[in-house]
Image (cartoon, rainbow, N blue to C red):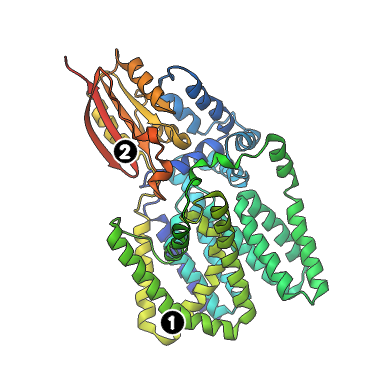
Amino acid sequence: MSKNKLIFLLFFLLLCGSLLRGNHLSGRSLWTDEFFTLFLGSGHGREMKPFLDSFALRKPPPVIKAQAFKAFLKNDRQKGIRDVTEGMLYADTHPPFYFWLMYFWMRLFGDGAGAIRSFSLICGVLAIFMAYKAGKHLLDSRTACFCALYVAICAFAVRYSQEARAYSLIMLIGLTSLFLSLRFEKDRGILDGLLFMLINAIGIYTHYFYIFIAFAQFLYYTIMHRKNSALLTRFYIFFLGSIFLLLPWVLAVAQRGYNYYLAEWIFGYPGLINKASSFFLGLIGYITVLPVSNKTISALFNTAIILLFVWMAAPAIKDMFIRYRRQCLFCLILFFLPVTGMLFIDILQCGALLRQERFWVFSFIGFIPIMGYILRYIYDRKRMIFYSFISFMAISSLWAGRMQFGPAPAAVSEWINREASSANKSAVIIYNIRSAVFAQAYYLDDDIYLAPVADKQQLEEVFQELGSSTQKIFLVRHYHRTDNSLMTQPFMQAEYSGRGFCHKKDMKRDDIGISEYVKCVL
């Protein structure tokens, strides 16, 4: 392929990737996890925690207007980067790099849905280019184009390029690390080694699970270059250097005390069979998003996708192993080590990491070159199947841009606003799992009151407190798509059965359930 054709092709892929990622970017509601980006990235994390804790301690819990909760989600010029860092240490389980970047991003572009998601979009588009660069150094220039094509139209990559979370950045960092690692392996340049060291450290500063990607490269070098002591020693120095760069954050976390169980929603999920099935669901996520919720149709759809993928992939991977054995091993290590690590944590802690689609981003780095080679193999032998398959993937990515992921409060808040407009005073009582009260407040009218509760007793107390002055009360429950039971503690199913209010109606939308109560007419 000529240089001009290659430049045109890459430009076309970047354009297609940008259009897919821009599809409905700000049209969907922000969902629960994206609100963490808002209040942590804006520097409100540390003050948010004691504010919420006060609700659990006071009897009855205070009832406050939505406007007060929204203040924690606004870009505050009085907050500095130190406030962001302290918020991460005291209120969250994640490392700070992404939130440092978002602190500056929101000051430049604002804190609206489109503004905060656009950072992930840019990272996703850059990841397309880095997929080409990594594929070129790992395999060849032609296969690299198919790697870029895959990242450009893959629903998994598109979906996380439209979310105000760190996963699109992780894709970019992981592919950049892969590229630098491969170039260092070939040229043994000091600059490549130093950049690899820095990028790996940034990756772990972005998400703790990035250590899986770093260790996969460590394992590859240890296996493949065990007889080349000079290269291996130099790699070890840069690898250990990246770990050394983590020391300031490790000391800060150690001083505070790290509580992994702040991510309480992933624990208490036993069952090996479900964990095994999560592997196949994760693979399906690399190909398409599921457009149906019916369990029977979903099972048939998933089975068909897996069979189609195996039929296409098996001969291609066999050919790749014959022609590029070392490179194939590298990709397999990059793919399987994160999956195996998360499976081990799931078994040990009765967790649900593998059921979280977003955590598959760490294995995605190793899957990209494999999928690029599969697409090239199909293109060379079964051109019609190739065009049908990439059309299916592109359509799936368009669909992903309009799918609502996770508990997303815009639609239910608009419904509450309409229902509450006919009452002099209305209130929302919310089971405050994972700070859902801030997400709910974001789309509510300023004058609607909110009361987060932590148990059934507080629920009864708030109803009694509101009884004399409130005409309508909305009881709101935020669930989680991975498995509603993960977010369904017994009190979340409790209904109010006391005096003064009558149950009027229920609705559920975007993984949020609402029960509406009106003052009884005696």
Q: Is residue 430 above or below residue 104?
A: above
- Whether residue 24 sits left or right of residue 349 in the image: it is left
Crowd rating for badge 1 (residues with CA inside 10 Å; few <14, some 14–19, many 20+): some
Q: Residue furthest left?
A: 522
Residue type at mark 1 is: Ile
Query: Which residue is at a point 62% across and 81% down the rendered structure image?
Result: 325
Foreground residue among 13 and 353: 353
In the picture, the quarter occupied by the C terminus is top left
- Seen at 45% across and 86% down, the residue is 380
Residue 98 spot, x, y in % from top left: 59, 47
Residue 192, picture quadrant: bottom right
In the orientation shown, which residue stands out farthest toward the top?
468
Image height of 164 relative to 124, above or below: above
Q: Which residue in the structure is indicated by mark 1?
A: 378
Mark 2, secondary structure of its residue: strand
Position of residue 258 in the picture relative to residue 32 (left or right): right
Q: Quadrant of residue 495?
A: top left
Label 2 packing within 10 angstroms: few (<14), some (14-19), many (20+): some
The type of residue carrying mark 2 is Gly
Residue at label 2?
513
